[in-house]
Amino acid sequence: MLTAPGPMATPAGELVLRPVALPADLDLLTGWMNDPGTDRWWELAGPPETTAAHLAAQLDGDGRSRPVLALLAGEPTGYFEIYRADLDPLAAHYPARPHDLGLHLLLAPAARGRGLAAPFLDAIAARLLRDDPRCTRVLAEPDVRNTPSLRAFARAGFTRTTDLDLPDKRAALMIRRRADA
């Protein structure tokens, strides 16, 4: 996952993903998680311990999920989770393929409404597909009610293939395929 984590060009400017670092990023991410627009979809509002526990499960885990900050021109602008979808509980709900990668997206409250989600998703998906020849698909499973997210994924080349009844939501399975797959 992101074997060459260097800068990515987007229409909005240079995007860099860097691993989340605790405790340095905790206050920033806790603030974002407590934003009502974030909490509606992420359901992680609460004290810093809530955010820390969510991050620690990934940072201390087996490497199947990687939490990263998105920096646009050096400024924290978003948070992504890049994960092995084929090894995730999600795989029980769709026809998983080996090395499917998944994305979760959170734009910083101040970054919303600026048209950043689609260019970020496009650049990240292209990088993931380029860097891992075993990966033929990048996918996401946003809530079917999250219209801005669905539009952003569609603009970034993802196709809504089906809707899934997951334990915590009804999700749209959005897939971006490698061009030669």
Image (cartoon, rainbow, N blue to C red):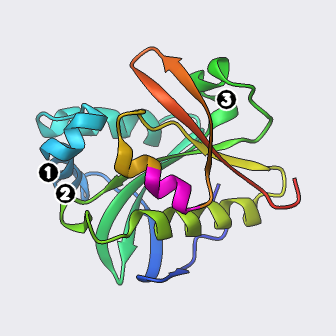
- Which amino acid is tagged 1? Gly
Residue at the extreme right: 180
Q: Which residues are magenta?
A: 151-156
**Residue reaching furthest to the top:** 167
First reached walking from the N terminus: tag 1 or tag 3: 1
Q: Tag 2: residue type?
A: Leu
**Percent x, y of residue 102:** 59, 43
Q: Position of residue 103 (x, y in %)?
A: 53, 47
Looking at the picture, how far across and down is residue 62, in whole percent?
58, 35
Secondary structure state at the residue bearing disc 2:
helix
Contact flag, marks 2 and 1 (Cβ < 8 Å): yes
Q: Can residue 3 be seen from the camera position used here?
A: no
Residue at x 88% of width, y 60% of height:
180
Task: Determine the CA span between mark 1 and mark 3.
Answer: 30 Å
- Using the rendered view, name the quadrant where residue 131 is placed: bottom right
User: Which residue position is annotated with label 2?
Assistant: 28
State the residue position of label 1.
Answer: 31
Residue plotted at (15% across, 40% down): 48
For residue 124, side relative to residue 97 (left or right): left
Relative to 145, say whether 94 is above or below: above
Q: Which mark is residue 174?
A: none
* Residue at the spot of label 3: 87
Q: Which amino acid type is shown beneath numbered disc 3?
A: Leu
